Image (cartoon, rainbow, N blue to C red):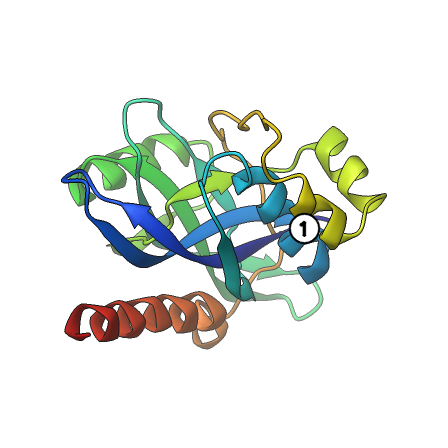
Amino acid sequence: MNNWFTVKVKYTKQLDNGALKRVSEPYLLAAMTFTDAEARIYEELGAVIRGEFAVTGIAKTEIHDIFAYDDADVWYKAKVKYENFDADSEKAKKVAQNFLVSAHSVKEAYERLQESLQGLMVDFEIPSIIVSPIVEIFPYQEDLDREISRRPIKEVQEEEEEEVSGPGAVFSSSGSDVDDEDEELEEADSEIEDDFEAEDEEEEEA
C-alpha cells in the first residue's frame, strides 16, 4: 500500500530578481517506504532543480484525499470531522481526516471541499483550513516506482540530469484510509511544517 510522505529538500534557488538564496521546500509524494520516498524525490526533482540538492527530512503524512484544480497552485490543508457508526461497539465514533485542495483563497478552498465531498452519506463539518507549505505533489506512478525499486538510490542520483516527465495534476488521489482520532491528527505534518518555518527564520536572520 502506498502512503503519503512529506519530503523536505534544501537547495540554492534563483529568485525572480536574479539573487541566489538557500531554501528548504516541502514536497508531498506517494511511496511505499521512506527509502522509496527518498529515491523518488531524486527522480522527480533531478531534472527540475539545477545544481546539488539534499533531502533533509522525510515524514509520513496522513492525507485522506487530494483535490486538485488546474487554475490554482496553492495548497490548503483542511480538517474534516464526521461521525462513523462502529458495528462492534454499536456506538458512533468521531472521525477526523485531513484533505488537501488547491485554491486561491481559504473561502474558495472551503467551497471546493464542500463540492468535492457532497457525495458523502454522512453529515460533516470543516473546523479548520490553513495554507499548506507543500510546493508540489507527486502521486503514485506504477511504472516509475517499479523502475526505482530495481535501482539503488546512488544510481538514481547519478542520473539527475536526465529529463523526467512530471506527474501532471493530481485528482482526488487517495492516500491513507486510516481514520484518526482528533488528538492523533497532524502530528507528523505539523512537526515538519513547524521545522520549515523555524529554519526559514534562521536563514533570514543570517
The quarter of the displayed image where residue 145 is located: top right
Residue drawn at the location 58% of the way across and 26% of the way down: 163
Q: Is residue 93 above or below residue 41?
A: below
Residue farthest to the right, as pictured: 150
Q: How many tags in the picture? A: 1
Q: Is residue 97 left or right of residue 115?
A: right
Q: Is residue 169 left or right of residue 114?
A: right
Residue drawn at the location 56% of the way across and 46% of the way down: 29
Q: Is residue 190 above or below residue 4?
A: below
Q: Is residue 155 above or below residue 161?
A: below
Q: Amino acid at mark 1?
A: Ala
Residue 40 place in picture, x, y as percent: 64, 46
Residue 94 place in picture, x, y as percent: 47, 65
| Residue designated by label 1 | 39
Q: Is residue 22 visible?
A: yes
Q: Is residue 127 visible?
A: no
Q: Nearer the viewer, residue 81 or 34?
A: 34
Q: Is residue 52 left or right of residue 21?
A: right
Residue drawn at the location 46% of the way across and 31% of the way down: 119
